[in-house]
Image (spheres, grey):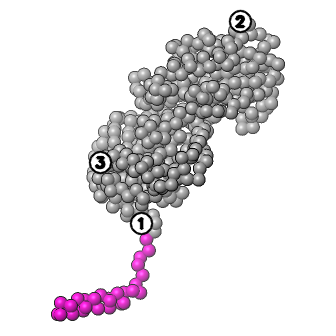
Amino acid sequence: MRFKETILSLVAVALAILATTSCIKEPSVSNKEREQISLKAWIALNKSELLDNFQENGGYYVEILEDDKNEMLPINGNNLGSEPIMDQDTCWVFTKMTGRDINGAVCMTRSYELAQLCGTFSHSTHYAPYVNYGGNTNMGLLEGSYLAMRNELKLGDKTYKMRRGSKVRLYLPSSIAYGEGGSQAEGGYEGQYSLDASRPLILDVEVLDVVKNPSELELEMVRDYIGYEGIWTQAEKSESEKSGEDDDLKLKGLYYNLNYNPETDDVSTHKYMQPQCMTESNKLYRPYTDNRKYMDGNMAVVTDSINKILIKRFGKGIPRNEQGEKTQVTKNGRAKIWYVVRFLDGFVLDTNIAEIRQYLFDEKTPTCEVFSYSPSDDEGKEADNRQAIGAWYYCIPQMHHGAYGQIITTSGYAYGASGISGSTSTETSSSGSSLSYYNAMNYYNYYNSYYNYYSPYYNYYDYNYYNYNYNYDVDEDTVTTTTISTEILPYTPLVFTLYVEPYE
């Protein structure tokens, strides 16, 4: 009985204390502070060795994955190697990025290997390094990656500066990641799931190259591609376009080829270059390893298949020695054009030829129309108001009806320093669930087995808690169609293969 009385007394005391303190208000904690506390707790549990790698400016943690060019020296020491990004007022950085949520699920990736593992790989996506301005003003980089590149990183009692060759993993609070809006990646760079609002981001950043002048890099790439000007002709402005002291009519980085014919094209001699920062001695990435299409990077196989499609569809075309003034399009003429657009590594980003879309993009019944174009319609217009890019405006007049031709151009006569963002649209015709119980469990098991390198935490991942749920009701007739518009990065040269229909 005395034990029972003692317990009742303790309860009474607790109630009395509660009564006297119930009017005391708890200190308010913002969502940002709450997330910062949670992120620190997660780091302490899963990556305790990174607690000393906390960056005050931004409130994030840094892990060094690889370091080809840096040497980490004591604080106030002088770093050696290539010039750090933060020490360059003006530069452009080429990066390979992958973002995950705090549970390890991929929410975006520019890695074709990881996209294949995640089941998000797309034949319409050019898994090339992301290119953006990395100078002393942020003009588009994710805030967390920009802070890491532009600041000296504290790693315990050492410091680190990012530069070419750096590969880091950043543990970012949402305030310097995707914030209250979260992220839904597009253009084929999607992951398993989107990133929910106000969630931390684990971001892998690999710096593949840093350049001062991307325009000069483009010119070098184009010159290396054509090799010599024997079969390529440099495009020129008309006399009426001369202005002020500009008496040089030749257009740097813009060439056309009237000798091209798919029947005689020797694809084995083509110089297929990986875009921006791929060289024979430094193979930083090989984006095409799907055997059905790109044959482990052998673009000559793809080109040969495309050439056979062109010949079957349009014939051999008018030979160069039979082209003359009567067949030339001229600036005032109108051309009906069928085209294939490539990056310099041979990747086809767009075409209006149905058979090629079926071959490359697995489209079953593509809708394609001929492009009707008259250069005179764009005369005197600003680039934004033209029907076609500048490369077409200057080169199409030189093309011939009933003949093939090619154009190679730097971004200055294409999509410039802004490029074109990739986009993804999905249409689903179904009223049922998209994931059965067994499929959900199989995917869950795969998920845990793939990401268990992070920590044992993922073996206790609560599938339903994070809303990756299953449903027993499955509609077997569900059809989902996904259309991806290929991204064109800033400062990216393009190659056009054209066929102009015979004159009517």
Q: Which mark is residue 34?
A: 1
Within the image, what quadrant is residue 387 found in? top right
Image quadrant in which the N terminus is located:
bottom left
Query: What residue is shown with label 3?
Result: 158
Disc 1 residue crowd, few under 14, some 14–19, many 20+, Cα 10 Å: few
Q: Is residue 16 magenta?
A: yes
Within the image, what quadrant is residue 469 found in? bottom left
Q: Is residue 503 magenta?
A: no
Please tell me which residue is depicted at 82% across the width and 23% down the height of the picture: 332
Query: What residue is shown with label 2?
Result: 321
Please tell me which residue is depicted at 56% across the width and 41% down the height of the picture: 187
Q: Amino acid at mark 2?
A: Asn
Alpha carbons under labels 2 and 1: distance apart: 74 Å
**Residue range of the region highlighted in magenta in the rendering:** 1-29
Q: Amino acid at mark 1?
A: Arg
Magenta: predominant secondary structure element? Answer: helix
Q: Nearer the viewer, residue 208 or 296?
A: 296
| Res 345 visible | yes
